[in-house]
Image (tube, rainbow, N blue to C red):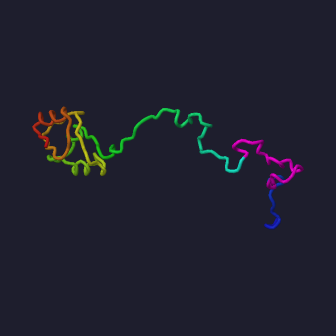
Amino acid sequence: MRLNDIKPAAGARKSRLRVGRGIGSGLGKTAGRGHKGQHARAGGTHKFGFEGGQMPLQRRLPKVGFRSRTKAQSQEVFLYQLANLKADVIDVVVLHQAGLIDSRAKKVKVVSKGEIGRAVKLSGVLATAGAKAAIEAAGGSVE
């Protein structure tokens, strides 16, 4: 076998249909488009998803869910995570260095989950009412 002997399998390559070329071709006159109507005419196309004026599926279905654009900018930290930190003054930089928050975080809030047994000072970090009470009960403060 040589490269110039290679041919496609018999029947694998069909010749192109020449529509509208006489009655003997089987696709003369209307050229397989039927009689009249939108699809029989040149340029007779409609937009994707069009259902003939019926309300399209993508508009019939309910819209589900919501994705907040600010979600990545605000993050939460728990009280028990603050208890494991060695720093006495806790701000966004300390939390980022400890790996508790992402670099994109602009707002950080301490949430009352777990306990804190030592005094810490929160600086530039928000806290819920329960978290603030727990920090102040441990001798700390929230700015």
Residue at image point 32% right, 44% down: 70
Q: Position of residue 38 (x, y in %)?
A: 69, 43
Residue at image point 21% right, 50% down: 94
Q: Position of residue 28 (x, y in %)?
A: 84, 49
- Taking depth in this image into account, of 91 and 49 the one nearest to the observer is 49
Q: Position of residue 88 (x, y in %)?
A: 14, 46
- Taking depth in this image into account, of 34 and 141 the one nearest to the observer is 34
Report whether 39 appears left or right of 31: left
Residue furthest toward the front? 36
Report whether 68 appears left or right of 82: right
Q: From what the image shows, is residue 42 above or below residue 62?
A: below
Quadrant in which residue 80 is drawn = top left
Q: Is residue 30 magenta?
A: yes
Report whether 8 appears left or right of 123: right
Q: Position of residue 115 (x, y in %)?
A: 20, 34
Q: Is residue 116 magenta?
A: no
Stretch in magenta: 13-40
- Taking depth in this image into account, of 65 and 141 the one nearest to the observer is 65
Quadrant in which residue 116 is drawn = top left
Number of labelled discs? 0
Pick the quarter of the image with the C terminus. Answer: top left
Pick the quarter of the image with the N terminus. Answer: bottom right
- Main SS of the magenta segment? loop
Residue at image point 59% right, 44% down: 48
Residue at image point 70% right, 44% down: 39
Residue furthest toward the right? 24
